[in-house]
Image: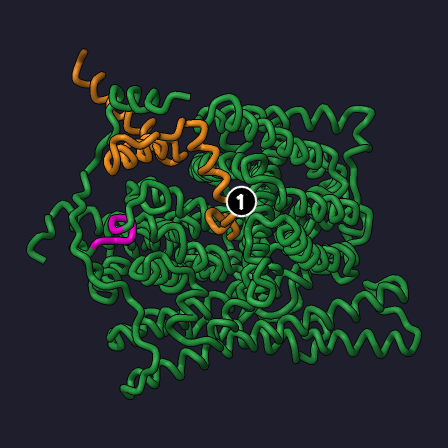
C-alpha cells in the first residue's frame, strides 16, 4: 500500500465517481427517459475499476503470475509461431480474434426485456464471469505451451471428458455458424443495395489477395487501406445499383441466399487461404476497430435518449415476440457474447499464449480484451434502445405474426402494447433506403437502423442515414462471412483429425479428397440449420437463437469447469471460487434454459410441447397459426424435434464434462489422483521487456530486405 | 526542429510501427534476424517466398484467427 501515490488515489476515486454516477442515473430513472451517456459512464467506470483491482487480484493472488518464468514465446522463440509480441499489438490481435458479430446481435434481441437487464448483465457478467474465463484459460494455456482447450481437457481430466468436450465444441460451432449465417440472410433478403455491396466484398478480397501474392508481398497495411476505400465505394455504388434497372438481379429471397451462402462457404473453405480468407481477415480487422471507435464517438457526441422502458412487461410474462421465455434464464442466454462467451476459450487457448512476453501481461490482454468486447455489446444495446419501441417490434417480431404490409405490422405492434403508424413505418424504411423494414429479424438491421440514427445525429445530415445503415450492415456481414469461412476450416480440421483415427489418410492436410469431403460435411451441417432457420414458419431467429446462446454458454461452462479443476489440481483450492462462482451461475442459467426449452408445457418455449401440439393438430387435419399449410405444420414438427434433440445432446455433453471434472477434483483432494498436473517445468526468463522500442531501425531493415536476392 | 515537432514525429513513428506490427509486416525482418543469428551462411528466403509460405501454412492448420463472438 505504501507505493500508492495520492495522485493515483485521486484518479481512481474519480473513475469510481463516474461509474457510480452512471449507475445512480440508471437506477433512479422512474419513467422519464435517460441519456445513453449514463449507460456508457456506468460501463466504463465499472470496467476500469474491475481491470485495475479484480483482474490484478486474480493475477497476483489466484494465478500467482511470475515474470521470472519464461513464457512459451520466449522458450520456443522460432520467429514464426512463437515470438514475444508487444503487448499492445497482442491485445489488438486477441481482441480481433475474439470479437465478431456475436456481441452486436444478442443485446439487440435482449432489448425486448428493456435496457436494464441487458445493461446489468453485460457489465456484471463480463467482470465476474466472461473476462475471468478468458483470462484464466489464457493463463493455463500459457503454462502449457499454448495447448488447446480440447488437449487440456484430455490431458487433465481424462479420455471421456476430453472426447465429450471435443464433440461439444464441434457441435456448438455448427450451431454458431448457422445462426450467424442466418443473421446475414435476414439482413440481405430482398435488399438489392445490401446484397450488391456484400457481394462486392468477394472481388475486393480476391483483388487484395492477388495484390499481396503477386504485386507486393507482405504490404498488409497498404492493401488494407486500398480495400477499405474500395469497400466504401461498394457501399455508395449499392445505392446506384438499387435504383438502376438491373436492381432485380440483386433482390434475392432468403432461400436463394441460403443456397448462395452454402456454395460460398464451401468454395471459400477449399480455396487457398491467400485468395479469400487472409485478405478478408485484414479487411474485417480494420473495419472492426474503425467502426467501433466511430460508434463510440457517435454515442458520446449524439448523446441519444433511451426510448425503451427500463424493464418491459415481457421480462416477467415471458410472452415477448422476439424470443419466448422470461427474464431468467432467457435474457442471460440471449446475451452470451459480451458478457460470457465460451467461444473465447478456444481463442484464449491457442494462438495468443504462444506470443505473450510476460505472464504479468495476461490480465491486460485476456481480461482487457473481453472488457472491450463487452463495451461493444453495450454500444449495440444502446443502438437498439434509441429506436422507437414500435419500430423495434415491427422489425424484430416474426414475419408470421406481423404480416406483409405496413398496416398489418402496425396492428400487430399495437397488439404488443406499442404504437407505430403505417406511415411512420414506411418513412423509416425510406430513410434507410430499404423497401420494407417489417420482420427484418436477426438483429443486424435493427443495429444498423440504430447506428444510422446515432451517426446521422452525431455528424449532421439525415440524408446520410441510408449510407450509415448500409455501412453498418456491411460491417456486420463482413465479420460474419469471415467467421463463416474461418470456422468452416476449423471444423474441417477437427473432422479430419477425428476421422484420421479410423482412416489415417484423412490426417494428411494436403490430401484434397479429405479436405473436400470434410469441408462439404461441415458446410452441409450448418447449411441444414440455416435452411431450417429461413423456412421455419415460427421464425428462425425465434427458434434457433436460444439454441445458439445456450450452446455458447454451455461451452463457457465447459471452459470454467476445466479452469476450476486446474485451479484445484494446482493447489489453489482456496481461490477456486473465482471460476467456481461464474461456473455455478452459468450452469444454473444453461441448465434451467435447456430444461425449459425441452420440457416446458408452453409450446412457445418447450420444443417437445411444441412438437406434440403441432403433431396433434396435424393429425386432426388442422393448421395452427402462424403456419399456413399442412406442409408448414410438418416443417415445424421436424424442426422442433431436431433442435430439441440437439439441445439435449449439448446439455448432456456438458454434464459429462462437469462430472468428469468433479471426479478428478475429488480424487485430487483425497490424494488419489491418477492424472498429474501437466504444467510445463519452470524455466528462468532472460527476456527484458523494453518500455517501448521501435525494434528495427530503418537502416537495418533496408539491408535485411535486400538480403535474400531473388 | 522544435521539440514539439520532434515529439509529434516520434509519436507518429510509434503509431505507424504499431499498425505495421499489428498487420504482421515485421515478421519477415524477424525471420531474417532469427535465421542469420543461428546460421550466418544460410540462404535466406526472399520476402515473397517467406510471405507466401507464411500464409500457406494456414491452409494446413487453420486454427489461427477467429472472430466469432
Q: Out of B57 and A95, give the one closest to the viewer.
A: B57
Residue A397 in sight here: no
Spot the residue most to the left.
Answer: A2
Q: Which percent across, then down, holds residue A358?
A: 23, 50
Numbered range of the magenta stretch = A70-75
Side of A196 relative to A36 (left or right): right
Instruction: Identify the residue at image location x=24%, y=54%.
Output: A359
Give x and y (percent) for residue A621.
Answer: 93, 74
> Is residue A71 found inside the magenta-colored segment of the image?
yes
> Quick check: A448 above or below A177?
above
Display colour for chain A: green
Q: Quadrant of residue A447?
A: top right
Question: In this figure, which residue is indicated by the disc labeled 1?
Answer: B59
Q: Residue at x 36, y 32 (%)?
A: B28
Residue A127 among magenta residues: no
Residue closer to the observer: A183 or A566: A566
Q: Secondary structure at mark 1?
A: helix
Name the one closer to the observer, B63 or A540.
Answer: B63
Chain B colour? orange
Q: Is residue A432 at least partly visible in the picture?
A: yes
Amino acid at each position: 500500500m505504501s507505493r500508492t501515490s495520492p495522485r493515483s488515489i485521486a484518479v481512481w476515486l474519480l473513475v469510481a465517481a463516474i461509474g457510480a454516477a452512471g449507475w445512480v442515473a440508471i437506477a433512479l430513472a422512474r419513467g422519464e427517459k435517460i441519456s445513453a451517456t449514463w449507460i456508457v459512464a456506468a460501463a466504463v467506470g465499472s470496467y476500469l475499476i474491475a481491470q485495475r483491482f479484480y483482474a490484478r487480484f486474480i493475477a497476483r493472488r489466484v494465478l500467482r503470475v511470475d515474470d521470472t518464468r519464461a513464457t512459451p514465446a520466449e522458450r520456443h522463440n522460432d520467429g514464426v509461431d512463437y515470438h514475444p509480441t508487444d503487448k499492445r499489438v497482442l491485445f489488438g490481435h486477441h481482441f480481433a480474434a475474439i470479437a465478431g458479430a456475436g456481441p452486436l446481435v444478442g443485446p439487440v434481441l435482449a432489448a425486448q426485456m428493456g435496457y436494464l437487464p441487458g445493461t446489468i448483465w453485460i457489465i456484471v457478467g463480463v467482470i465476474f464471469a466472461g473476462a475471468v474465463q478468458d483470462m484464466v484459460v489464457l493463463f493455463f494455456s500459457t503454462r502449457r505451451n499454448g495447448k488447446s482447450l480440447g488437449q487440456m481437457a484430455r490431458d487433465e481430466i481424462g479420455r471421456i471428458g476430453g472426447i465429450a468436450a471435443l464433440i461439444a465444441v464441434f457441435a456448438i460451432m455448427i450451431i454458431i455458424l448457422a445462426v450467424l449465417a442466418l443473421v446475414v440472410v435476414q439482413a440481405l433478403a430482398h435488399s438489392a443495395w445490401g446484397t450488391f455491396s456484400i457481394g462486392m466484398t468477394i472481388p475486393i478480397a480476391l483483388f487484395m489477395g492477388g495484390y499481396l501474392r503477386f504485386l507486393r508481398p507482405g504490404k498488409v497495411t497498404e492493401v488494407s487501406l486500398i480495400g477499405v476505400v474500395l469497400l466504401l465505394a461498394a457501399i455508395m455504388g449499392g445505392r446506384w445499383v438499387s435504383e438502376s434497372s438491373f436492381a432485380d438481379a440483386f433482390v434475392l429471397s432468403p432461400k436463394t441466399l441460403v443456397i448462395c451462402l452454402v456454395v460460398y462457404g464451401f468454395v471459400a473453405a477449399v480455396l487457398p487461404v491467400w485468395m479469400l480468407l487472409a485478405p478478408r481477415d485484414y479487411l474485417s480487422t480494420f473495419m472492426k476497430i474503425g467502426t467501433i471507435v466511430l460508434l463510440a464517438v457517435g454515442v458520446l457526441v449524439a448523446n441519444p435518449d433511451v426510448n425503451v422502458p427500463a424493464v418491459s412487461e415481457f421480462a416477467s410474462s415471458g410472452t415477448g415476440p422476439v424470443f419466448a421465455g422470461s427474464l431468467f434464464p432467457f435474457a442471460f442466454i440471449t446475451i452470451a457474447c459480451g458478457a460470457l462467451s465460451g467461444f473465447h476459450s478456444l481463442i484464449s487457448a491457442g494462438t495468443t499464449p504462444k506470443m505473450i512476453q510476460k505472464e504479468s501481461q495476461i490480465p491486460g490482454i485476456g481480461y482487457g480484451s473481453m472488457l472491450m468486447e463487452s463495451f461493444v455489446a453495450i454500444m449495440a444495446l444502446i443502438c437498439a434502445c434509441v429506436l422507437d419501441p414500435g419500430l423495434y417490434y415491427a422489425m424484430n417480431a416474426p414475419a408470421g405474426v406481423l404480416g406483409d404490409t405496413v398496416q398489418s405490422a402496425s396492428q400487430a405492434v399495437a397488439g404488443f402494447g406499442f404504437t407505430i403508424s403505417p406511415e411512420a413505418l414506411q418513412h423509416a424504411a425510406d430513410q434507410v433506403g430499404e423497401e420494407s423494414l417489417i420482420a427484418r429479424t436477426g438483429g443486424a438491421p435493427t443495429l444498423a437502423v440504430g447506428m444510422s440514427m446515432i451517426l446521422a445525429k452525431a455528424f449532421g445530415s439525415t440524408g446520410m442515414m441510408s449510407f450509415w445503415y448500409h455501412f453498418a450492415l456491411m460491417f456486420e456481414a463482413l465479420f460474419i462471412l469471415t467467421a463463416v469461412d474461418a470456422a468452416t476450416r476449423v471444423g474441417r480440421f477437427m473432422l479430419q483429425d477425428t476421422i484420421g483415427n479410423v482412416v489415417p489418410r484423412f490426417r494428411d492436410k494436403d490430401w484434397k479428397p479429405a479436405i473436400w469431403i470434410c469441408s462439404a460435411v461441415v458446410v452441409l451441417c450448418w447449411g441444414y440449420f440455416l435452411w431450417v432457420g429461413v423456412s421455419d414458419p415460427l421464425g428462425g431467429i425465434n427458434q434457433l437463437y436460444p439454441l445458439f446462446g445456450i450452446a455458447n454458454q454451455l461451452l463457457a461452462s465447459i471452459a470454467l469447469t476445466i479452469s476450476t479443476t486446474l485451479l484445484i489440481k494446482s493447489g489453489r483450492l482456496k481461490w477456486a471460487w473465482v471460476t467456481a462462482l461464474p461456473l455455478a451461475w452459468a450452469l444454473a442459467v444453461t441448465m434451467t434454459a435447456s430444461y425449459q426449452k425441452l420440457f416446458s408445457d408452453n409450446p412457445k418455449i418447450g420444443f417437445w410441447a411444441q412438437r406434440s401440439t403441432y403433431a396433434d393438430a396435424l393429425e386432426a387435419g388442422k393448421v395452427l397459426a402462424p403456419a399456413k399449410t399442412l406442409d408448414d405444420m410438418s416443417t415445424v414438427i421436424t424442426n422442433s424435434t431436431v433442435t430439441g434433440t440437439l439441445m439435449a445432446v449439448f446439455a448432456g455433453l456438458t454434464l459429462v464434462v462437469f462430472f468428469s471434472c468433479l471426479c478428478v477434483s475429488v480424487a485430487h483432494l483425497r490424494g488419489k489422483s491418477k492424472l498429474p498436473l501437466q504444467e510445463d517445468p519452470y524455466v528462468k526468463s532472460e527476456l527484458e521487456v523494453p518500455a517501448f522500442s521501435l525494434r528495427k531501425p530503418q537502416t537495418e531493415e533496408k539491408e535485411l530486405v535486400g538480403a535474400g536476392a531473388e | 526542429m522544435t521539440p514539439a515537432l520532434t515529439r509529434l514525429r516520434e509519436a507518429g513513428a510509434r503509431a505507424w510501427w504499431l499498425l505495421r506490427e499489428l498487420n504482421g509486416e515485421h515478421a519477415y525482418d524477424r525471420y531474417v534476424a532469427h535465421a542469420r543469428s543461428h546460421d550466418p551462411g544460410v540462404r535466406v528466403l526472399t520476402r515473397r517466398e517467406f510471405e507466401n509460405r507464411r500464409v500457406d501454412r494456414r491452409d494446413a492448420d487453420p486454427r489461427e484467427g477467429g472472430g466469432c463472438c
